[in-house]
Amino acid sequence: MKRIIAIVRPEKLETVKEALFEANVSGMTISQVNGCGAQHGWTEYFRGTEVLLNMVPKVKFEIVTDDEKVQPIVDIICDVAATGNVGDGKIFVSPVEDVIRIRTRETGSEAV
C-alpha cells in the first residue's frame, strides 16, 4: 500500500476532488494548509510597512491506496491540477506498512 500526498492550488480543490470521485477513489482526507516554495508569496502593506507574506494557501489531499492504483491517481491529479505556472503543487508517494480500521479491526486493503 502507498500513501499519496498531493499539495495543490486552493482553486483546484473541487475539480481534483470530483475527478478522484469519478475514478472511484473512495477515501481521502483534505486539509487546508499553508506553505512556501518557488512561488515566494507576495508583498502587502500593513500600517504603512511593507510585509512579505511567504506562506501561500494550498490544499492537501491524502489518499491511501493499493500499489497498482497509485499511477492512475497521480495521473488524474497531475492532469486536473496543472495550470503550467509556478505553484501548481507537488505529489509525494510513500509506503504504508499497515492500515487498521478502528471499528472492525480490519487490516490492510480491507481497512482502506
Image (cartoon, helix red, strand yellow):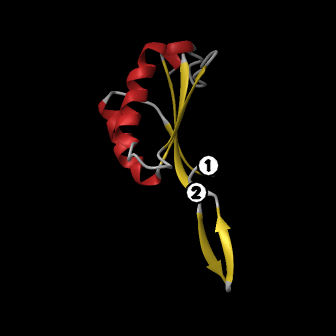
Disc 1, SS: loop
On the rendered image, what quadrant is the N terminus found in? top right
The local crowd at label 2, few if under 14, some if 14 to 19, many if 20 or more residues have their Cα within 10 Å, is: some
How many labels sit on residues?
2
Residue 48 rendering spot, x and y as whole percentages: 67, 86
Front residue of this view, candidates 68 and 82: 82
Q: Is residue 65 above or below residue 31?
A: above
Circles 1 and 2: CB atoms closer than 8 Å: yes
| 83 left or right of 50 in image | left
Amino acid type of the residue tagged 1 in the rendering = Gly
Front residue of this view, candidates 87 and 31: 87
Q: Residue 68's image quarter? A: top left
Q: Earlier in the sequence, mark 1 or mark 2?
A: 1
The local crowd at label 1, few if under 14, some if 14 to 19, many if 20 or more residues have their Cα within 10 Å, is: few
* Residue at numbered disc 1: 37
Q: Residue at x 58, y 57 (%)?
A: 56
Which-is-in-front pick, marks 1 and 2? Answer: 1
Q: Which mark is residue 101?
A: none
Amino acid type of the residue tagged 2 in the rendering = Val
Disc 2, SS: strand
Residue occupying the far bottom of the picture = 48
* Residue at numbered disc 2: 56
Front residue of this view, candidates 106 and 25: 25
Residue 62 rendering spot, x and y as whole percentages: 53, 34
Residue 19 rendering spot, x and y as whole percentages: 33, 37
Residue 98 rendering spot, x and y as whole percentages: 62, 16
Q: Residue at x 34, y 45 (%)?
A: 15
Distance from Cα at disc 1 to Cα at disc 2: 9 Å
